[in-house]
Amino acid sequence: MLWVDKHRPSKLEDLTFHGDITSRLEAMASRPQTMPHLFFYGPSGSGKKTRISSLLRGLFGHGTERLKLDKRTFKTPSNKTIEINMITSNYHIEISPGDAGNNDRFVVQSVIKEIASNTNVTTSKEKAADFKVVVLSEVDRLSRPAQAALRRTMEKYSHTCRLILCCNNLSKVIEPVRSRCLGIRVGAPTHDEICDVLKVVARKESITLPDELAINIARESSRNLRRAILMMEACHVQKRDGLTANQPVPKTDWELYIAQLAKDIAAEQTPQKLLAAREKLYELLVNCIPASVILKTLVQELTKNLDDTLKPQVFEWAAFYEHRIAMGSKEIFHLEAFIAKFMAIYKKYLNELFG
């Protein structure tokens, strides 16, 4: 088992940072009947899912840890069959409805209606929660019709079930959905907080973690705690005889791949290079790297050594094509269009600079 899963806190009292959020969740767990729909949002690796699972444990006890993976089949009004994977317990169900694509509206309505109509919740003696919980992950991936349907469904079944929504980007969720939930922003941990968690994990694994290496891992992780723990485990795999202070922190293959792509784009702006960039983009997408992550990482790499006068243009076009990616269906088109636009901007700058 990976360290990030092995040492993941399961109880509210075990959470190590964001103490103000923990206090609010403990208050909800002690008075479950007053708990509203919740909306957890914040950057990846900040601990949203950990806090959700800890809250469920506080509401229902150990029963929420007895999980099973279900593959549920839905039939749309047009007789199309959709298969969705769900994580379920006797008290809650967790799904990512965005996986259903254009049929996400039907999946959202069907799942909530099904679980809300079955109100037989067996709670432990010390718990008073008589409702079930639906956890919807990656709500920012839902289509607008699905979000509108979610709003109506939330109102209809609020007495028999509670919804816990989770996403990274709050701005992609419509206001009517946000206004019906208690928003809980889980911010990225600081470098010091990441170092503290890394030292706790290292102590549990009986290894010595030098302070210098912990700081380097925290910096390289971009304040993503999950990524930081994975990086530390990768360092341990590389050096079984013991971690050292000057040990390099390994990067993921896809990050190195995008860094090389950025170097190729900056080195030559030609149709041939654009065609080669398309092949690399396809390779990244095939390996399940999200288009938004590709674009963000590519922009970071391209602007590292870019003149300050060009950066505003690059950021503006990156935002433009990020919106296109979110609204469109062919991600490769918009990624390639951004690279073509960057090549045009950079080529013009070089021509004006050197003539």
Image: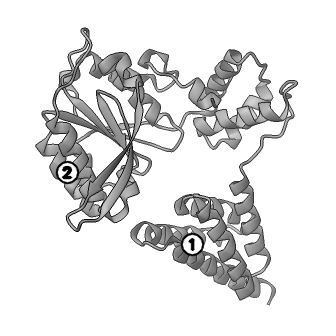
Residue at the farthest bottom position: 355
Quadrant in the picture for residue 21: top left
Per the image, label 2 sits on a secondary structure element best described as: helix
Q: Looking at the image, can residue 37 be seen? A: no
Relative placement, left or right, of 249 versus 103 is right
Q: Is residue 133 above or below residue 317?
A: above
State the residue position of label 1.
Answer: 335
- Please report the residue visible at 44 percent of the width from the left and 68 percent of the height from the top: 323
Q: Which of 56 and 353 is in front in this view?
A: 56
Q: Looking at the image, can residue 73 be seen? A: yes
- Please report the residue visible at 17 percent of the width from the left and 34 percent of the height from the top: 118
Quadrant in the picture for residue 66: top left
By what rule are the colours in the image chosen? one colour
- Please report the residue visible at 85 percent of the width from the left and 31 percent of the height from the top: 239
Three-letter residue code for mark 1? Leu
Name the mark on residue 319.
none
Quadrant in the picture for residue 133: top left
Crowd band around label 2 with a 10 angstrom C-alpha radius: few (<14), some (14–19), many (20+)? some
Q: Sequence-wise, which precedes: disc 2 or disc 1? A: 2
Per the image, label 1 sits on a secondary structure element best described as: helix
Where's the C terminus, which quadrant?
Answer: bottom right
Give percent across and percent down for residue 78: 22, 68
How far is disc 2 from disc 1 in space, using C-alphas?
32 Å
State the residue position of label 2.
Answer: 151
Crowd band around label 1 with a 10 angstrom C-alpha radius: few (<14), some (14–19), many (20+)? many
Q: Which of 246 and 73 is in front in this view?
A: 73
Three-letter residue code for mark 2? Arg
Give percent across and percent down for residue 314: 59, 71
- Please report the residue visible at 63 percent of the width from the left and 29 percent of the height from the top: 1
Give percent across and percent down for residue 296: 58, 60
Q: Nearer the viewer, residue 354 or 240?
A: 240
Q: Is residue 37 above or below residue 355?
A: above
